[in-house]
Amino acid sequence: YNMNLFRKKIKNSDYKIDQEIWLPLSFDNEKSNENSEKITNKIDNKKIKENIPRNIVEPLFGEKYKNVTVSSNSLSNCIFYLISGHGGPDPGAIGYKDGNELHEDEYAYDVTLRFARKLMENGAEVYIIVQDENDGIRDEKYLNNSSNEYHINKKPIPLIQKDRLSERIIIINDLYNQNKSKNKKQYCVEIHVDSRYTGQKVDIFFYYQNANSEGKKLANALM
């Protein structure tokens, strides 16, 4: 009903974004007198909003950022599986800056946590697949390196890439099947911070499965 109102431009914005549900005026035909004007397709001026904000505590974000205030339900129909690239025994790309050794997995993990927090603020259900209980969201210019990361199932991250990817596929598929009954949109996002030569400047780019129109649409939207 609300989607039709939006399409017909009776309502100015999508209810999924403004979280405002409009209801038609209700009336009792049996009690209305003969002179009562019949009301059809009219909008009640009362708008029902979902109960926000609410608070969530996520220890993985660290002491400073663990308290998350959900201020919007715009993503309440979405489930995200977030994977930060590499981790555990695999640091990913390694670079050097101001005498500091920089490991890709540390920065990918920090970006992933920040992304997860932002999604949760907008009502999404989020699964952080690679975890490190010692490293929350960090504000330092250079992040310390470690190999403490593990998978959400508490298993260590394999060193061999094929084994690592296979295990992550199994984890995601299991979670996907567990959550199918919720009738929510499910997305998997893997984040890397790739190394480039000095002459190459590539900021953000996205991969999606070949011939997958939904993946292509999502990648273009993120761009």
Image: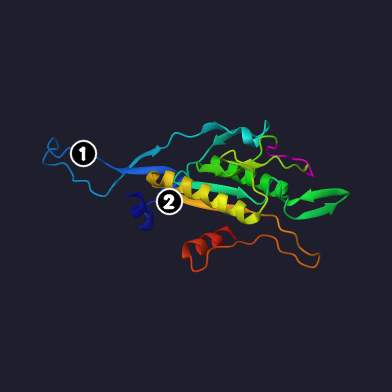
Question: Which residue is labeled 2 in the image?
Answer: 14
Whether residue 164 is visible to the viewer of this picture, yes or no, is yes
Q: Which residue lies furthest to the right in this view?
A: 99
Q: Mark 2 or mark 1, which is nearer the start of the sequence?
A: 2
Region in magenta: 135-143
| Residue 53 locus on image (x, y percent) | 51, 34
| Relative side of 176 to 201, left or right | left
Q: Residue at x 35, y 41 (%)?
A: 45
Considering the numbered disc 2 on the image, is that residue within a helix, a strand or a loop? loop
| Residue 69 locus on image (x, y percent) | 56, 34
Q: Residue at x 48, y 65 (%)?
A: 212
Residue type pointed to by label 1: Phe
Characterize the local packing of mark 1: few (<14), some (14-19) or many (20 or more) Cα atoms within 10 angstroms: few
Residue type pointed to by label 2: Asp
| Residue 138 locus on image (x, y percent) | 72, 39
Q: Label 1 to label 2, Cα distance in Å?
A: 26 Å
Considering the numbered disc 1 on the image, is that residue within a helix, a strand or a loop? loop
Q: Residue at x 75, y 59 (%)?
A: 195
Q: Is the magenta stretch mostly helix, strand or loop?
A: loop
Residue 138 colored magenta?
Answer: yes
Question: Which residue is labeled 1 in the image?
Answer: 27
